[in-house]
């Protein structure tokens, strides 16, 4: 018995018409009928009842049909089963992501995940910059995005990936006059500075706080465990100002209340830099060699917002 005999039998059993089955098999009806007779002779059972107008499965034919289909499915699956076995297993990698990542940066993360998707499944892990960097150092995370600067650990390598302009987040009813396009630091001297939420405070924002103090912004509001919404609440009430991303597409904009607006500084030009970090020993000859090479290509040109 040959596999072709089973394919011919299944085709006829599905159509219950020799002419129609023959067309689907790209052959003439007469040789198809002979192949079915050969199969019946070999099995010692009649598989079809045939007359001038009808073709019907016999009990033996009905019993053979699921068996034949099963055999053909197994044979047809050989190629993809072998391909699946030969394909390298996918490894799950965790990529650290701090709060407020710009959508253009997220698009590049998606591109990286797609580029290495045959071998690696990249999952995102949220957190504050300092904890994420620590997790890369001890191997819990493969890579992380981080707000720069970070500690100069010689075991880590970093690639600058984005620079975002920052502006003053102020009470709208106090500063958003007609035609106002910017704000000077001196205009904010009557307000306290509300820093970023504790969960996302890092070296950059601590340095920014120091800069503001040196430039004359002396008053502070300690917001403790407040969230971005909490900072916005304080600004909206007129007690303080804060500093955040200017780009309206930044997800941080979603935390702004009605009486809050963001204006660029006229005499102060802060930028928030973001980098992608990984351990050198894992990138050069290690398990992240392929991923880091892809990241270098995708993030080659730093973004600006």
Image (spheres, rainbow, N blue to C red):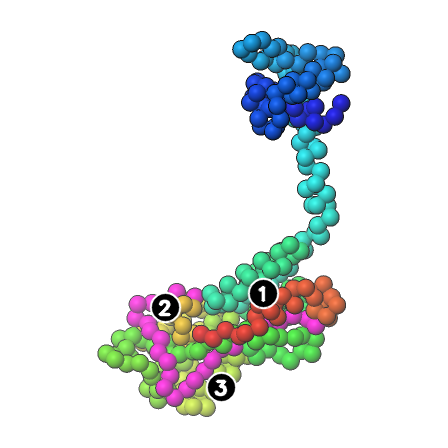
The quadrant of the rendering that contains the N terminus is top right
Gap between marks 3 and 1 measured at Cα: 27 Å
Looking at the rendered structure, which numbered label has been put on residue 96?
Answer: 1
Where does label 3 land, which residue?
A: 210
In the picture shown, does residue 137 fall above or below 17? below
Residue at left 58%, top 13%? 55
Q: What residue is at 38 percent from the left and 83 percent from the top? A: 265
Using the numbered discs, state the Cα–Cα distance from disc 2 to disc 1 in whole angstroms.
25 Å
- Residue 11 visible in rendering: no
Kindly indicate the quadrant of the structure image that contains residue 149: bottom right
Task: Residue 253: say if magenta.
Answer: yes
Residue 163: x, y in percent? Answer: 49, 76
**Front-most of residues 277 and 116:** 116
Is label 3 in a helix, a strand or a loop? Answer: helix
How many marks overall? 3
User: Split into 4 quadrants, where in the image is the C terminus?
Assistant: bottom left
Of residue 135 and residue 90, the one placed in the foreground of this image is 90
Given this view, does label 2 or label 1 mark the residue nearer the observer?
A: 1
Distance from Cα at disc 3 to Cα at disc 2? 25 Å
Q: Position of residue 213 (x, y in %)?
A: 45, 88
Q: Is residue 118 left or right of residue 164?
A: right
Q: Is residue 258 left or right of residue 12?
A: left
| Residue 172 located left or right of residue 14 | left
Foreground pick, 171 / 47: 47
Q: Which residues are magenta?
A: 251-280
Where in the figure is residue 60, as x and y percent of width and height?
67, 13
Residue 256's label in the rendered image is 2
């Amino acid at each position: 018995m040959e596999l072709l005999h089973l394919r011919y039998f299944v085709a006829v059993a599905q159509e219950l018409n020799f002419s129609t089955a023959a067309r689907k098999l790209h052959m003439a009806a007469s040789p198809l009928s002979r192949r079915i007779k050969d199969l019946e002779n070999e099995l010692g059972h009649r598989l079809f009842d045939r007359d001038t107008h009808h073709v019907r499965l016999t009990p033996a034919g009905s019993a053979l049909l699921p068996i034949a289909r099963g055999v053909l499915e197994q044979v047809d699956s050989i190629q993809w089963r072998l391909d699946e076995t030969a394909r390298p297993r996918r490894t799950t990698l965790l990529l650290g992501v701090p709060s407020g990542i710009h959508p253009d940066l997220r698009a590049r993360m998606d591109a990286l995940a797609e580029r290495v998707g045959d071998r690696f499944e990249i999952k995102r892990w949220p957190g504050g910059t300092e904890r994420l960097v620590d997790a890369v150092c001890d191997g819990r995370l493969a890579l992380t995005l981080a707000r720069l600067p970070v500690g100069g650990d010689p075991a880590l390598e970093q690639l600058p990936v984005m620079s975002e302009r920052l502006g003053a987040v102020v009470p709208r009813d106090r500063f958003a006059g007609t035609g106002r396009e910017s704000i000077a630091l001196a205009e904010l001297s009557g307000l306290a500075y509300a820093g970023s939420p504790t969960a996302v405070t890092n070296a950059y924002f601590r340095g920014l706080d120091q800069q503001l103090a040196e430039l004359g912004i002396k008053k502070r509001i300690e917001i403790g465990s407040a969230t971005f919404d909490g900072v916005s609440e304080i600004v909206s009430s007129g007690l303080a100002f804060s500093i955040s991303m200017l780009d309206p597409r930044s997800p941080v904009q979603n935390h702004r209340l009605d009486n809050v607006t963001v204006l660029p500084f006229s005499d102060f030009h802060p930028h928030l830099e973001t980098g992608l970090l990984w351990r050198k020993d894992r990138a050069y000859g290690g398990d992240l060699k392929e991923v880091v090479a892809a990241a270098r290509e995708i993030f080659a040109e730093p973004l600006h917002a």
